[in-house]
Amino acid sequence: MGGLWRWRNNPLRRTTDLVEAWVALSALLLILLAAPVMGSVVGTLAQEALQDSVREQHRSRHVVTATVVKEVTRAPLEADPEAASGRSSLSRVVADWTAPDGTVRHGAVLANIRTPHQGDHFAIWTDDHGSLVARPLDSATATTHAVLAGFGAVLITVAAVECARRLIVWQLVRRRYARWDRAWDRAGPDWGRTGTGC
């Protein structure tokens, strides 16, 4: 804004100076107005899509109780990074479970038991047919992802506006230098000697 006011009636003002000031003001307004709107729109769309996914996953995934048949390996595996307790370890076991459709299933799974023994019970997530699936996304995690998507959209919008502003200013500076070169060429090679070029 100060650039526009300063160049308003200045006799040294070039057209490119005024254009550059208007571009800077436009970029600032776009960053202040368009970026938050873009972030809000993207965040809202992401929230709706993720919450639909949460509802679908909770509808199609079921917790069932599995029973340890035997332990496959004694080495504990890393915990689920999204689990509430990141310190718990998982063990690989062979287990039996009953699928939601009533069929009995058997296979190697990860159990949230430090030292599994035959007959121990633990919870696993399955689909409608009893196949193992990851636990469903919870609503709070979906909201966090939507907020991050909104912030990402804001940052991308700001970066795009700033890149466009810099590109326009770069073009203006190139034109300014080209005009200076043409003015120097018109002045001729003897521009500094007394009595020449008049």
Image: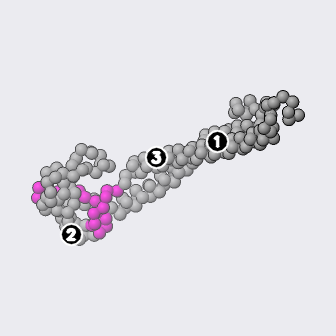
Residue occupying the far left of the picture: 118
Dominant secondary structure, magenta? loop
Marks 1 & 2, CB-CB < 8 Å contact? no
Magenta stretch bounds: 117-136
- Helix, strand or loop at disc 1? helix
Q: Residue at x 70, y 30 (%)?
A: 2
Residue at 24% across / 44% down in the picture? 87
- The quadrant of the image that shows the C terminus is top right
How does the figure colour the protein chain or chains? one colour
Q: Which residue is mark 1?
A: 27
Q: Which residue bears the numbered disc 3? A: 148
**What amino acid is at disc 1?**
Ala
Kindly report the distance in space between the C-alpha atoms of the residues bearing marks 3 and 1: 24 Å
- Label 3 element class: helix
Disc 2 to disc 3: CB gap under 8 Å: no
Mark 3: give few (<14), some (14-19) or many (20+) Cα within 10 Å.
some
Does residue 172 appear in this view? no
- Mark with earlier residue (1, 2): 1
For disc 2, the marked residue is: 104
Q: Residues within 10 Å of mark 2 (few under 14, many from 20)?
A: few
Nearer the observer, 22 or 53? 22
Q: Nearer the viewer, residue 62 or 132?
A: 132
Q: Amino acid at mark 2?
A: Val
Q: Position of residue 93 (x, y in %)?
A: 17, 59
Q: Amino acid at mark 3?
A: Leu
**Residue 43 placement (x, y as % from top left):** 51, 49
Residue 78 image offset from top left, x and y in percent: 24, 50
Mark 1 → mark 2, Cα distance in angstroms: 63 Å
The answer to which quarter of the image holds residue 167 is top right
Residue 73 x/y as whole percent: 15, 57
Q: Is residue 187 above or below residue 52?
A: above
Eye-nearest disc, 1 or 2:
1
